[in-house]
Amino acid sequence: MTNQIVLNGLPLPQASFDRYACREESLTRQLDMISGRRVLERIGRKWKVWRVRWACDYLEDEICRPALEILRSGGPLTASVLPDNGGGMVTASFVVESVTDPTFLIDDDDRPVWHGLGFTLREERPHA
């Protein structure tokens, strides 16, 4: 089975349905206009960054806690991701844009699990 994403050496379980996406997009920056509007400005035509979205319904404690530690570290992290363009795994330095905190619950088999962890990542340095 191919991994979709590996965070700092920690392979995460495969997300199913629409819970994983990895796409290449143009490098942009947000600008606040004098009128108060917020716009996105594309920086060059050749510069691209990888943007990753991952979420999982249920995670074992052995995976969830190390993943949260990595995601909450505050610094860049190394991740290997499977892009949607059909190529192989891409490894790069990413920054965490958002994290959806999981909740704790007991599943149908009376096992403790974490529910609802999700995050988005953006490549730290653009590539051509």
Image (tube, rainbow, N blue to C red):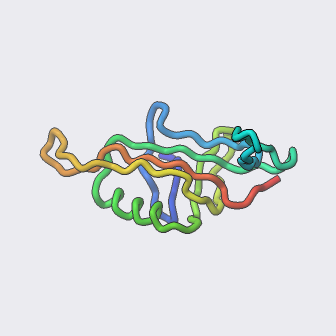
Against 55, residue 97 (above or below) is: below
Residue at position x 57%, y 39% in the image: 21
- From this viewpoint, which residue is outermost toward the right? 45
From the viewer's perspective, is 120 left or right of 55?
Answer: right
Q: Quadrant of residue 127?
A: bottom right
Estimate the x, y position of residue 96 in percent, counting from the top left: 55, 56
Against 94, residue 32 (above or below) is: above
47 vs 33, nearest the viewer = 33
Q: Quadrant of residue 24?
A: top right
Residue at position x 56%, y 53% in the image: 97
Estimate the x, y position of residue 12 in percent, counting from the top left: 44, 53
- From this viewpoint, which residue is outermost toward the front? 35
Residue at position x 69%, y 44% in the image: 87
Residue at position x 44%, y 41% in the image: 15
126 vs 100, nearest the viewer = 100
Estimate the x, y position of residue 68 in percent, counting from the top left: 40, 60
From the viewer's perspective, is 74 left or right of 67?
Answer: right
Against 28, residue 85 (above or below) is: above
Against 120, residue 85 (above or below) is: above
Estimate the x, y position of residue 35 in percent, counting from the top left: 74, 39
From the viewer's perspective, is 19 left or right of 94?
Answer: left
13 vs 104, nearest the viewer = 104
